């Protein structure tokens, strides 16, 4: 299977490297700066098991040739419009596109651009970041990759995807209910991002502060009410596990949006929080805590 990994940051770099190491034909589509960095130093993975370096196949938008069987999109959501233009020449009649982005807005955006039959569901669970020299740093052993047809019908095309991904040295989950997995991932990451960005700290600091537990639970409840109104078929055991994970004061957690914010980078405010508020408005839901988070993030973006 010919695979194009759109992006070689922490997510794309890690999972793309594992696919390449498993013998898959993987090309990384990257910008000039990342291209030069990877050409010079290789793709470096720092994991709990040690350091690995590989020389990846690289391409820039101007040098893409031929169609790919699978395009995995791993960029930040605010870069999606440009990436869609970049990957367009690589999309053929049999190409499938698997986005691994935060939120859900990107699915409709990709479907409108390339067609509903081309987009499949995907998400990952990994604690990883880029180091100062562009190395991919996996901070914990967690490395899960979920995928499946958005309508739950995992046909022969999806079976081919599973055959390519399942032996890539990561924990793969071929799901026949990927939409619920996507809703639940959004519930987790948006709650985590909202409270960390608003409080400017990790969950341990928040939960051990006066009113911190109430803040976290309040944000969680607002988000759950929004996604349920939007079509999430609540799975009580799953949502309870998410809240339990977030509410453990012994485990300090932060979101990628918070880490980007404290470094002064651009953040996915509209895609992670703003989109929830738009969906809440459709159902006349009161979300005062989410509104406070959104104002906070808008002010941050104005001040960048």
Image (tube, rainbow, N blue to C red):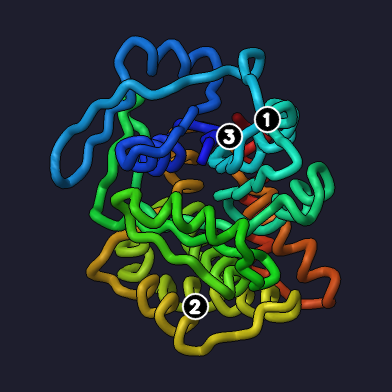
Indicate which label's residue lies in the foreground, 2 or 1. Answer: 1
Indicate which label's residue lies in the foreground, 2 or 3. Answer: 3
Provide the residue designation for mark 3.
266
Provide the residue designation for mark 1.
90
Q: Residue at x 40, y 35 (%)?
A: 13
Q: Which mark is residue 217?
A: 2
Image quadrant in which you'd find residue 273: bottom right
- Front one among 140 and 40: 40
- Front one among 270 and 120: 120
Return the x and y of residue 74 as percentages of the image width and height. 54, 41
Q: Residue at x 14, y 45 (%)?
A: 49
| Sequence-first disc among 2 and 1 | 1
User: Is residue 90 in sight in this rendering?
Assistant: yes
| Sequence-first disc among 3 and 1 | 1
Image quadrant in which you'd find residue 158: bottom right
Give the vertical position of 1 relative to 89 (above or below). Answer: below
Separation of residues labelled 2 and 3 (CA atoms): 27 Å
């Amino acid at each position: 299977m010919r695979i194009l990994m759109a992006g070689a940051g922490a997510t794309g770099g890690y999972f793309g490297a594992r696919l390449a190491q498993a013998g898959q034909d993987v090309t990384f589509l990257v910008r000039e700066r990342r291209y030069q960095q990877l050409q010079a130093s290789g793709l470096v993975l720092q994991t709990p098991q040690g350091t690995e370096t590989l020389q990846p196949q690289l391409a820039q938008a101007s040098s893409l040739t031929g169609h790919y069987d699978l395009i995995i999109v791993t960029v930040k959501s605010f870069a999606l419009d440009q990436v869609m233009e970049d990957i367009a020449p690589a999309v053929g009649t049999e190409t499938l596109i698997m986005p691994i982005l935060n939120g859900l807005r990107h699915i409709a955006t990709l479907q409108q651009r390339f067609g509903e039959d081309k987009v499949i569901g995907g998400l990952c669970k990994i604690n990883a970041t880029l180091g100062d020299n562009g190395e991919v740093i996996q901070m914990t052993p967690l490395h899960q990759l979920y995928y499946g047809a958005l309508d739950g019908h995992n046909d022969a095309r999806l079976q081919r995807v599973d055959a390519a991904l399942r032996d890539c040295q990561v924990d793969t989950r071929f799901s026949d209910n990927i939409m619920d997995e996507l809703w639940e991932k959004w519930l987790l990451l948006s709650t985590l991002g909202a409270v960390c960005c608003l409080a400017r700290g990790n969950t341990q600091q928040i939960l051990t502060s006066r009113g911190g537990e109430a803040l976290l639970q309040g944000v969680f409840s607002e988000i759950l009410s929004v996604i349920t109104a939007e079509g999430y078929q609540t799975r009580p055991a799953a949502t309870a596990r998410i809240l339990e994970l977030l509410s453990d004061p012994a485990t300090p957690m932060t979101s990628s949006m918070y880490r980007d914010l404290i470094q002064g980078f651009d953040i996915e405010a509209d895609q992670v929080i703003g989109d929830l508020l738009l969906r809440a408005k459709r159902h006349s839901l009161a979300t005062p805590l989410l509104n406070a988070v959104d104002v906070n993030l808008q002010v941050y973006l104005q001040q960048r």
